[in-house]
Image (spheres, rainbow, N blue to C red):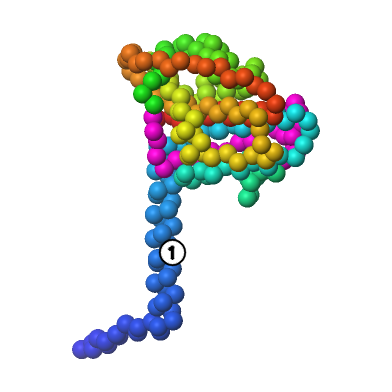
Amino acid sequence: MEIKKNNPRIPLPPKKKRIRTIAKIILLWLIVFLFASITLASLNTARKPAIYLYPTEDMMVNVKVNVNGLFFNDIPHYGEGWKVFVTKDGIIEGKYDYLFYEAALLHLDIPEKGWVVKYDQLENWFDEKLPKFGLNEKEKRQFVEYWIEELPESNYYEIKLFDKKFVDENLTLDISPKPETIIRLLFHFKALDENANIEEPIIVTPERKGFTVVEWGGILR
């Protein structure tokens, strides 16, 4: 007859037990943070805000972005802020047209007014409207090249422009030396199956003078 031996589980020493508990807590927080980051990024991601800098003379420029959410995907490397050499023609560090980042925002305050555009008319709409918003030819071309590829095919798109107050509060720019002109365009794109009637806002074209900063980006929902 075989006698089964009783092998009681040996308890961990207190120090190892504490280490294991701390490791579990850290892992749990990492999972929560990752899930929250992915959720935010999938819902409220400001895609490719591109910051163009046009100082009146070649100089060093300091740029910081304070995001109400999660900051990621920076080019060139952001670190504690961009400190870059910029020519008066807008060339950054001898090779970049603009500073690039992306951000997942904690909340959105979507405007009521906007435009509804047929998908096959988007490029024409951009060509017509973007100069009225203040973009020059290069900025407009790069905007169109990016967003025509990013917007999935749909019957229509609802396009809205976040107001200055929302952008400044949720994607705060701190630039030194201080620019004389700042143009910030953050669009909200929403695919629609059918046409819709919404009130269109009045576009006031800004005047570009002195040290000018231009930023464009968008959120796709």
x, y percent for residue 49: 56, 33
Q: Vertically, is 56 above or below 144? A: below
Residue 5 seen? yes
On the image, which quarter does residue 207 sit in?
A: top right
Residue drawn at x 46%, y 37% is 45
Residue 218 seen? no
- Residue at the disc numbered 1: 26
Residue drawn at x 27%, y 87% is 5
Q: Number of labelled discs?
A: 1
On the image, which quarter does residue 139 sit in?
A: top right
Q: Vertically, is 186 above or below 17? A: above
**Residue found farthest to the right:** 58
Residue drawn at x 43%, y 79% is 16
Residue 99, magenta (yes or no): yes
x, y percent for residue 105: 45, 40
x, y percent for residue 51: 62, 32
Q: Main secondary structure of the magenta part?
A: loop
Q: Which residue is at the front of the view, 68 or 152?
A: 68
Highlighted range, magenta: 84-110
The quadrant of the picture occupied by the N terminus is bottom left
The quadrant of the picture occupied by the C terminus is top left
Q: Residues within 10 Å of mark 1 (few under 14, many from 20)?
A: few
Amino acid type, residue under disc 1 in the picture: Ile
Residue drawn at x 43%, y 51% is 34
Drawn side of residue 9 relative to residue 100, left or right: left
x, y percent for residue 216: 56, 28
